[in-house]
Amino acid sequence: MTVIEVDGVRMRYGAAEVLHDVTFRVDAGETLAVLGPNGAGKTTTIEILEGFRRPSAGRVTVLGTDPAHGDDAWRARVGIVLQSWRDHGKWRVGELLGHLAEYYPRPWPAPELLAAVGLTGQAGQKVRTLSGGQRRRLDVAIGVVGRPDVLFLDEPTAGFDPVARREFHDLVTGLDTTVLLTTHDLDEAERLADRIVILDRGRVVADGTPAALAREIVGADEVRWRREGRRFTESTPDSTGFVRELFAAHGTAIAELEVHRASLEQTYLALVRHAETEVAR
Ligand SMILES: Nc1ncnc2c1ncn2[C@@H]1O[C@H](COP(=O)(O)OP(=O)(O)OP(=O)(O)O)[C@@H](O)[C@H]1O
């Protein structure tokens, strides 16, 4: 089932067109990471999907509804973590989550949710006294308190320390929901996303799994192994098939096998640089 559908979307701010014919979809249960350089249009796209902005042209549906016409029942199924919330400063963390939970039919109980985002120790603290990273964890908790069917995360781990980041990744992986996130952290995208969309200057320049994009854009994987004391290295677009044949031919004589796929970072840099060269031509 398609949960998010974006079809031929254009967005204009005054004379500037910042999204040109953007098309992609996200299926139920999938996590999609939208990547792209600063100003590529990621936040604009996510704001259209959340119903905060209307596109200049094209069609958008989230859970089968045009976000611009989403009612309260639709909103209750959509979780949102914006780049920065600045409200609620006087509330205490636990009370705020308990209060927000009342708006939803099947909320996440506050104590459990606080534990999941690592804020149990801050439950009694006022929101404005939290550190930057703790504040961000609370943002995430606010986004998921209603157990949404679809969750939008705009740069969710900006400012997280490495432990908080890892805990957040575990939290997102454990959610039984469709997720669309934007991030500049390519390791994060690789870890969390089933599929990647790369936006560059308002256009989709790539859409696929990290592995498929690496194959398509960077090309070959590298396979390394040792046999009878000698080291071997082979570049191949089909590492699985190659390894199968290698074992069929040499079986247990193969040692220290390694397969290196191009990283998402290599793919991303190749694509974004490529797009820049094309525009410059
Ligand atoms: N309200 C606005 N009015 C005019 N231009 C805007 C407005 N909001 C965004 N833009 C422009 O639209 C383009 C896309 O911005 P957007 O915030 O969607 O990019 P982004 O990919 O999220 O960038 P970043 O990675 O820096 O967060 C940018 O050129 C930005 O300057």
Image (spheres, rainbow, N blue to C red):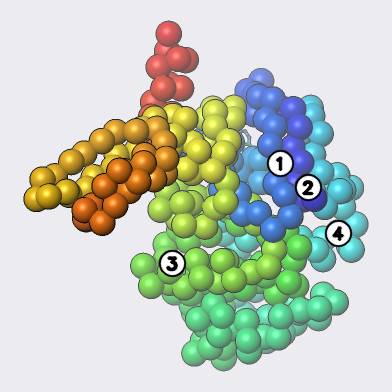
Ranked by sequence position, the earlier of labels 1 and 4 is: 1
* Cα–Cα span, label 3 and label 4: 29 Å
Ranked by sequence position, the earlier of labels 1 and 3 is: 1
**CA neighbours of label 4 inside 10 A, class few (<14), some (14 to 19), many (20+):** some
The quarter of the picture where residue 88 lies is bottom right
Closer to the camera: disc 4 or disc 2?
2
Where disc 2 sits, the SS reads: strand
Residue placed under numbered mark 4 in the picture: 74
Ranked by sequence position, the earlier of labels 4 and 2 is: 2
- Give the residue drawn at x 42%, y 13%: 280
Measuring from the top left, give residue 46's x and y in whole percent: 66, 46
- Give the residue drawn at x 21%, y 39%: 233
Q: Which mark is residue 2?
A: 2
Closer to the camera: disc 1 or disc 4?
1
Position of 243 with respect to 36 (left or right) is left
Ranked by sequence position, the earlier of labels 1 and 2 is: 2
Q: Are marks 1 and 2 in contact (CB under 8 Å)?
A: yes
Ligand 1 falls in quadrant: top right
Residue 179 shows in the view: yes
Q: Nearer the viewer, residue 147 or 245?
A: 245
Q: Which mark is residue 165?
A: 3
- Give the residue drawn at x 53%, y 88%: 120
**CA neighbours of label 2 inside 10 A, class few (<14), some (14 to 19), many (20+):** some
